[in-house]
Image: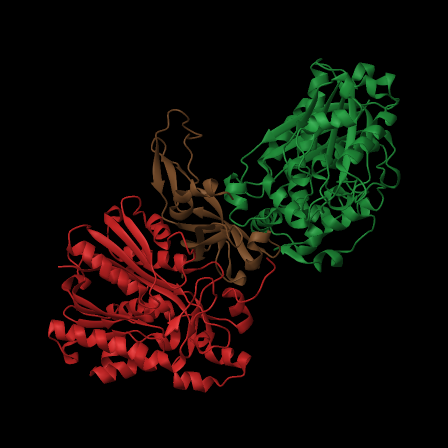
Amino acid sequence: MTVARFWRHLPQRYNMVGTKCETCGRHFFPPRSLCPDCRRAGKIVPHKFTGSGTVVTYTVIHTAAEQYSMLTPYVLAIIKLDEGPQITTQIVCDPSAIKIGMRVKSVFRKIATDGESGIIHYGTKFVPVE
Amino acid sequence: MVGIITYGAYIPRYRIKVEEITRVWGANASDITGGLGVFEKSVPDLDEDAATIAVEAARNALKRRNVDPAKIQAVYVGSESHPYAVKPTACTVGEAIGATPVMTAADYEFACKAGTAGIQTCMGLVKSGMIPYGLAIGADVSQGAPSDALEYTAAAGGAAYVIGNDNPIATLNHTCSFTTDTPDFWRREGQSYPRHGGRFTGDPGYFKHVKGASNLLMKEVGTAPKDYTYAVFHQPNAKFPQKVARDLGFKSEQIKPGLVVPHLGNTYSGASPIGLAATLDIAKPGDRIFVCSFGSGAGSDAFDITVTDAITGKDFNRGAAPSVQQLLANPIYLDYARYAKHKGKIVMQS
Amino acid sequence: MRDVAVIGIGCTKFGEKWESSFRDIFVQAGALALEDAQMSGEQIDAMYVGNMSAGRFIGQEHIGALIADYAGMASRHIPSTRVEAACASGGLAFRQAVIAVASGMEDIVVAAGVEKMTDVGSDESTDTLTGAADREWEGFMGATFPGLYAMIANDYIHKYGLTREQLAQVAVKNHYNGARNPIAQFQSEITLDTVMKSTMVAEPLRLFDCSPVTDGAAAVIVAPLDRAKEFTDTPIKVLATAQASDSIALHDRRDISTLDATVAAGQRAFKMAHLTQKDIDMVEVHDCFSIAELCAIEDLGFCKKGEAGKFTADGETALGGKIPVNTSGGLKACGHPVGATGIKQVCEIVQQLRGTAGKRQIDGAKIGMTHNVGGTGATVAVHILGRV
């Protein structure tokens, strides 16, 4: 991922800043500037997500893309954030421990690096709530 | 009165035991556990580094107290393992806690005392009225060369301190330092591992500077060891802080809560900050805490601290973030091969 | 709107074609289709070609022009358009060709699909395929394509239950069929054991639950039905063409193990053709992963949600079953040259309806269906074809 492309989503990747439609109460992560339900009638404002969620489904990745190959086997999951939106993320836990319905919370980790000399892409992963 | 507004620590979940390292190098575990008093050390996860640790420690600090991040107008991160040689860890931390853009920032390096140097800087900026709050962090994923003595103790962890002057949980009554040009331990630019002067790191290094700063502080403040409830000394191993405490006139009960190195290892820039955090975790209003860090190169920063009523007051919730003891609990042990993979000690195809 | 018929088909052998280039395989497929329709290139009015990612696989864009040029059409200056919807590129190219003829805009149109995947290493091809998903919010977070379908599988298992054997039966059946398809990449039958003991890719999907990396090209020629007899004795009528879209990211779907775009496209196709599932004699579905076939037959309405595993294990989707699925061998055994698959599916149905499917022929085949998916279900194209 190039520098500009990574940088412009820092508020999303570091701090889970999305948006909320004040007209209907729906939350969006990643942020949307147009509410699909209210469309032009929707008043969109920024919203910082709490980082709490529940595991909806998951897998354990054994064969990964090159950038993530050091991490295998790792847990990839779709989680439902408490505010409503679902996201795809890694869960940092023993692969045998992951369960649908598990509560998770956000942590700050390295997502990827652009090789040995490129930029480090930090972001958000999730861990089980103990 | 300038002081600590809130604090937080972070220690990765993984550990490696000393006997697992000695197994690989054919050394004798009891030489280390007996001689250095260290049994195991923390190891970063594959996706952790000094920056992620610094962010977690800072976020833990901010969980304990309602601090408007926009008022944190200085961020200093001290480490020997900044992820970049050029591009400050402090900027990543600032962004991750919402303190950007109105803030000053810089990364510090002074071996194991880079974190306490940041606390001193923040004290000055706050005391002079230049900023409302400053954030100082010591965080590391320290390096120790394979089979070297340092490999048994070089660990990962960090602690963060928000410094301010409105209702601190502990006042930073005084600080002073003792600094010389001493080549006891160093790492040249581009080198993977530090080198050290062996036994030279003792008296001319650690002891001279810790005693120098400690005695200077007590002279300037007019105190003696008995005036303090607790003391935290830099802990590269368990022996050095115990010996310097004894030599200075402190008792073992005073250093006990802050002596976390036996099951944590030496977190380099995180060492004194984590030791202080462990002490604040159990401190009561009125407790007086003596802190003296040490960084090779060399220098020591000493602090005279008094815990206030605010630590048990309504504005501060100590239980909102994990204590150092909680962070040390439930570790996941690694064998040496996994440890080497985590620490980047295996040469991969480039 | 005019009725449209398929008058010619051509398919290269699918596989790792080290000696063939992108241009070679396209030209080969095109020539086979023209020969099948007993026509010459001069009669072609327009071309649509499905291709997912020549840009990344061979650093080549502008595929529409390249294809027309190498098909010998450059001097005739016909319109030639590249269509892309990840793995549904071929299905969409077919639909565009059908619409061009149905609307009266064009008469004789080629719909082709081509993908040359082996000119790059597996790391590069894997990463390229991840572009079918949401790069920013799925790929960058560490999702792989098998990983996304594995999450569909785990959601499915959680909701409906599914045994490892039922899931593996999909690949076993498709290899059985592929062994009877001369152009299939894999020509050998396999056992449940082969599937269940293969390398784990993303739990629960193993290597043999996943379609391979393949080079291949396919082409069909469509014409107005009332002109079809000029070219062929066995014109096959396009009874329905339908397409649907959905959110690109799996996490934004209404239900993770239901491909709503399949449901929508399927319903539209049945409505357009005035048919129901009972009328379909065989269907080519998008089995990029074994779980995808199970979801497809449910989402197209051939069995109830949650029952596809038993349905498959009971043999209902085998050659002799109630509704043969993927007589070609599917993506799993026939291979999956991404942009070509949608067109290959049409070729297979046409062969079945003509009675030329050899050892995998379904007797009395009158109506067939194709189902082509892009990504994890963000695009779906469904077609129904029938003997005239």
Against A121, residue B325 (above or below) is below
Residue B196 pos. (x, y %): 41, 75
Give the colour scheme of this rendering: by chain
Q: Residue furthest front?
A: B181
Displayed quadrant of residue A130: bottom left
Question: Disc count in the image?
Answer: 0
Chain appearing in red on the rendered image:
B
Residue C357 vs residue A126, the one in the foreground: A126
In the picture, measured across the screen, residue C298 lies left or right of residue B237, that is right
Q: Residue at x 67, y 49 (%)?
A: C122
Residue C78 vs residue C133, the one in the foreground: C78
- Name the image quarter holding the C terminus of chain B: bottom right
Residue C255 pos. (x, y %): 54, 41
Against C338, residue C240 (above or below) is above
Whether residue C365 appears in this view of the structure is: no
Whether residue B221 appears in this view of the structure is: yes
Against C47, residue B207 (above or below) is below
In the picture, measured across the screen, residue C311 lies left or right of residue B55, that is right
Displayed quadrant of residue B180: bottom left
Residue C102 vs residue B48, the one in the foreground: B48
Residue C29 pos. (x, y %): 81, 32
Chain appearing in brown on the rendered image:
A
- Name the image quarter holding the N terminus of chain B: bottom left
Residue C167 pos. (x, y %): 68, 51
Chain appearing in green on the rendered image:
C
In the picture, measured across the screen, residue B19 lies left or right of residue B284, that is right
